Image (cartoon, helix red, strand yellow):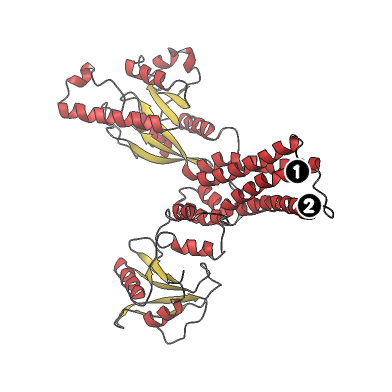
Amino acid sequence: MSDTIAAVATPPGRGAIAIVRASGPAARFIANRVFSSRRKLRERVATTGHVLDASGARIDQGLALLFLAPRSVTGEDVLELHVHGSPAVSREVLTSVLAAGARLAGPGEFTRRAFLAGKMDLSAAEAVADLIEAEHRSAARAAAARLSGGLAKTVERLRSQLSAVLEELAASIDFPDEVPSPDPPTLEQRLHAVMQELDALARSREHGRLVREGVGVALVGAPNAGKSSLLNALLGSERALVSELAGTTRDTLEETLSLGDVVARVIDTAGIRHVSDGASVVEPPSHALLEAAGIARARAALEQARIALVVVDASVPLSRDADAIIAETRGRERVLFYNKADLGRIAYDARAESERDACLGSVFCDEDVADVKERLRSIAVGSETIDVARPMLAAGWQLDAVLEGRRGVSRALDTLRAGAPVDLTSGDLTTAFQALGMLSGRDASEALLDSIFSRFCIGK
């Protein structure tokens, strides 16, 4: 952190404004080198002027903002140059800043410096990347809740409770004649309360994952069952190519569908059938190979998705391919939709007892499409309501830290219940205290920090 870093902080491409940001001890020196104005730069005051290149030639007219340490986002001196949003202009401005003494920032290095300066905890720092990548309102709200420190406050409160116990144990060991040992039943109650909160945090991981990553849905069925038409109806737009000819879809197509508090990543797949059927062997070899590749991708998507959305043509007798897909997805999380009810319901009426929970409808009926959407939401979330404003674990490393803390508290409780001396709980409680420190970043390793900040873009 002894050097000064710089990067373009706005997205690539053309826009109204581009921002080049520099952070570090040389920020003020760089400002004097690359920015010319009739007025002197003042802290937190936007100043108009011209950005200059290394030779002193004007690059663009723009604004300069100077934030002095420690009152900046990184805790260091920060310079922001706001120029016109041409890629050529932003590139030239960045080159000038680098020539004046900065180096190009690495991924997430600005946010990492903010974390190291104590401007935010580690969970909030990671929430910055989640907020940038959020694809729907719930994901943005959940990331914003963590960015505001909601998770850190909960973790620090639990750490304070463990710290108080450890201090009492240490005092009773160091000064046995003056400080009595904690009362075992009372200590057990205190640790049990910590356990309950850790359990609640661990359970929040599933909701946090759903909000952050969404749920995978594979849209599968025999050729010409209406899968692409259903995808278009769910999305409310003509996203997938639709034709009366079977086998129109050859490759997978992924789209994002809102399911209330979570999103579904719906993958429309090629119709699955046995390519050795008579209908296939008469096709040119290249078409048969292409269809086989599409079917292979469809099966891979089905295997990776959490939910199978199986579409069956209800207007005709059940084909061997449709029957095979129904059997293959039986016993897993799925929505079975008998489509084309406007043309008939032969296959639906003949369905097996194990398919009694299937739904019948048409992609042209809004109520039927809404029913499919609600069934997907019910499977993804269940009967619970996701409160995105409450602290939730959003990453696997956060869950690992909570579970490690829970194991330490659990071992301490086992020691107390066994009637052993209370001071024997000290080691396990220290382990739990340090594990929770991972969430705030107080005890985070360099490897963990590298892993988290590698997700960031260079200018953040």
Mark 2 and mark 1 in contact? Answer it, CB < 8 Å: yes
Give me the disc on residue 112.
none
Q: Residue at x 70, y 50 (%)?
A: 162
Relative to residue 134, is residue 90 depicted above or below? Answer: below
Q: Position of residue 37 (x, y in %)?
A: 41, 84
Q: Residue at x 51, y 67 (%)?
A: 74
Give me the disc on residue 172.
2
Q: Position of residue 151 (x, y in %)?
A: 60, 51
Mark 1 residue element:
helix
Res. 85 in view: yes
Res. 393 in view: no
Q: Amino acid at mark 2?
A: Ser
Q: Position of residue 433 (x, y in %)?
A: 64, 50
Q: Position of residue 35 (x, y in %)?
A: 39, 80
Of residues 353 and 158, which is closer to you in this image? Answer: 158
Q: Residues within 10 Å of mark 2 (few under 14, many from 20)?
A: some
Which of pointers 2 and 1 lies earlier in the amino acid sequence? 2
Of residues 404 and 157, which is closer to you in this image? Answer: 404
Q: According to the image, label 1 marks what residue?
A: 422
Mark 2 residue element:
helix
Of residues 22 and 193, which is closer to you in this image? Answer: 193
